Amino acid sequence: MPTTIKQLVEKVRLSSTDIKKVKWNTPIGCKEEGIYIVSLSENIESNKTIKEFPISMTILETWIKKLDYFIIDKKETKDSKIIRERLSEFWIPDESILYIGKAPLRKRGGGIGNRVQEYYDTAIGEARPHAGGHWIKLLENLNELHVFYITCENSETIEKEMLSQFGKMVSESTQKSLANKGPILPLANLEDGSKQRKKHGLSHMKLK
């Protein structure tokens, strides 16, 4: 069964009644620490799933052009079809959650609103201000996504636990398909809370 946002939030002992939501690219005014989740679904208790990876080849080719080339398994390539095929291996067709992120408080200002805005503002292939989760920028349906958020203390710890729970809650078919590809994570999370990375074989994905 796909993992709902409500289930995941309650697994880490937060109250699902405190979850708030905006459409992708909508500013969030919250300045408190917390967690945010990007999803195909618009409802915390249901899932919207897409069988085939909805990648925009136009965006992918723009990304390749910006970097000049990708590295896959230590070999340079500019072939968008090869890159698409590798990325597609990490699409989970029966899950709606695409990214789980923490939003800590920082000296220069922080909190959920600031961190999510940094996510919106970072173009694919750029290293700053928030390159984490940049795979999500490849989606042709990006502007249809929803961002759910909830305030909490110790967001780093909560994010780590949430990512772990996600990997445990996916379907048996997903467990099998991703068994040898590192930690099982939402599409755009490339590492878990313990810095264990997906075995995607891709590098040179961002400008320095």
Image (cartoon, rainbow, N blue to C red):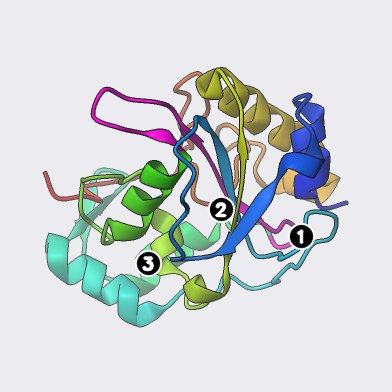
Q: Say which amino acid is labelled 1.
A: Asp
**Residue sitting nearer the eye, 25 or 93:** 25
Residue that protrudes farthest toward the bottom in the picture:
58
Residue shown at 51%/22% (left/top)? Answer: 156
Q: Say which amino acid is labelled 3.
A: Ile
Q: CA distance from mark 2 to mark 1?
A: 12 Å
* Circle 1 residues within 10 Å: few <14, some 14–19, many ≥20: some
> For mark 3, what is the residue?
82
Q: Position of residue 127 (x, y in %)?
A: 21, 46
> For mark 1, what is the residue?
94
Residue shown at 36%/63% (left/top)? Answer: 83
Residue shown at 23%/74% (left/top)? Answer: 62
Residue shown at 42%/78% (left/top)? Answer: 56
Q: Is residue 106 magenta?
A: yes
Q: CA distance from mark 3 to mark 2?
A: 14 Å
**Residue sitting nearer the eye, 172 or 147:** 147
Q: Which residues are magenta?
A: 93-111
Tell me whether the residue at label 1 lies in contact with that at label 3, contact meaning CB atoms closer than 8 angstroms: no
Q: Position of residue 48 (x, y in %)?
A: 75, 68
Marks 3 and 2, the one that precedes in the sequence: 3
Of the two numbered discs 3 and 2 in the rendering, the one whose residue sits closer to the viewer: 2
Q: Say which amino acid is labelled 2.
A: Phe
> For mark 2, what is the residue?
90
Q: Position of residue 129 (x, y in %)?
A: 24, 45
Of the two numbered discs 1 and 3 in the rendering, the one whose residue sits closer to the viewer: 1
In the displayed structure, 94 sits above or below 174; it is below
**Residue sitting nearer the eye, 189 or 116:** 116
